[in-house]
Image (spheres, rainbow, N blue to C red):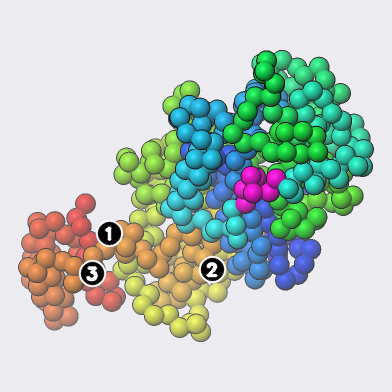
Amino acid sequence: MLNIYNSLTRKIEPFEPINSSEVGIYTCGPTVYNFAHIGNFRTYTTSDILLRTLKYNGYNISYYMNLTDVGHLTGDNEGDADAGEDRMEKSAKKEGKTAWQIAKFYSEVFEKDFEKLNLLKPIEFVRATDHIKEQIELVEKLEKKGFTYKTSDGVYFDTSKFPKYGEISNLDQIKEGARVEKNPEKKNPRDFALWKFSPKSESGFEKRQMEWESPWGVGFPGWHIECSAMSMKYLGETFDIHVGGVDLRETHHPNEIAQSEAATGKKFVNFWVHSAFMLVQGERMSKSMGNAYRLYDLEKEGHDPMSLRYLYLQTHYRQEMNFTFSALDAAAAALSRLREFMIQNNPGDLSHDEEGAKEYEKLFLDSLNDDLNTPQAISVVFDLIRSDVPTRAKVVSLLKFDEVLGFDLLHAGSALGQIPISDLPQNVARMVEEREVFRREQRYKEADTLRERIWKLGYEVLDTEKGSEVRKAS
């Protein structure tokens, strides 16, 4: 049985789904005003491992992730998420595009990066701007139940009316920041906007690119309301698991819980899973320091995105992680060893009834079910490779493990640049085939001579149980 740390109760608990046949999961995704960085993708990889572990345990999954394309204000970085400019509108002005173009561009880049890290896609990436109706309806429900009040700049949730407010967080950390001017119209510093009015100018309302009619006037939804409205639409008023970065635990997630449970009178989510922060070479990640690396930044330096995935899994998701390029290189080397093993022991066509190494499969599953202990799971992988278990059984088990680890080991040859014989230059292909004959005849001296000649032509030959594999020499 999977045991997982629940941020709501602050302890590891056995996971029990609401519905035995299907688990509902919602992950807080990015605000698509800019590129997602490698710290963001640590959270999404945690979500992916959780998803894959549940599948490995036999559960069916309903999985959704939001893309915030309206309502996330710049004040979030300064202590008040209801102050400042809308990030989408600000980015549009900066880049000379419309807010809709900004959302489309950065959403597409995000989804491509998502694929490069071999993250399982949700049923749908749900967008805030596609669910304005649902958000307005939720605010109306809260208004009817007496949980809201109106100010000159919007409709706010009154946290004093919700006694359990902040139970998931550290309440002393939920306060207005010193870097922004406090809103004197808020009844309580912790109150938050459900609907924001379009800002006023001297000539009346300032026209925004993203605004909608509502019962309270022209405006746009607050940042927090989208996740409640969309998650409950697709997963029900109470669902199993909500995933996000640990930074969301102090404000965004307490607000989600408050508005959702105030509206429905039911528990919102049973399990809350938060991924810890990631440092970069011992420093907090920030654009001003130039260390908020994108996947693209790593790729242009020749790093394989899957090496980053491997690096993520070497640290437990609840532990602060320190990214360094030397650690990334070490992860790449370890992943290469794993891929080399798979190439040298080409699985070919596996039958469904082939057995693996049962003892190691149990150890692997036990590691995952111990609060997603991926460092221990990877240790089991290499313990298996070093063991005296028959090679074929090792390969069978490794491919099972890869259903969770997600390294795409079935295509390890392609990842390492393996080249089909038919795609080689004729002279190289001829030497590879001739060398294979020498190997079968145990004429190893002649085979080694041909390997050297092939190397000088820019190709490397690897000997596997299935024959010779060729790739570009590094």
Residue 222 sits above or below residue 341 on the image: above
Tell me where residue 212 sits by quadrant.
top right
Residue located at (50% from left, 82% from top):
352
Cα distance, mark 1 to mark 3? 10 Å
Q: Is residue 429 left or right of residue 39?
A: left
Any magenta on residue 131? yes
Mark 1: few/some/many CA within 10 Å (<14, 14-19, 20+) = few
Any magenta on residue 279? no
According to the image, label 1 marks what residue?
417
Task: Give the residue type that dot 1 points to.
Answer: Gly
According to the image, label 2 marks what residue?
360
Asked whether residue 195 is in view, the answer is: yes
Furthest-front residue in this view: 203
Residue 456 sits above or below residue 290 on the image: below
According to the image, label 3 marks what residue?
420
Numbered range of the magenta stretch: 126-132
Q: Is residue 292 left or right of residue 147?
A: left
Element at badge 3? loop
Element at badge 1? loop
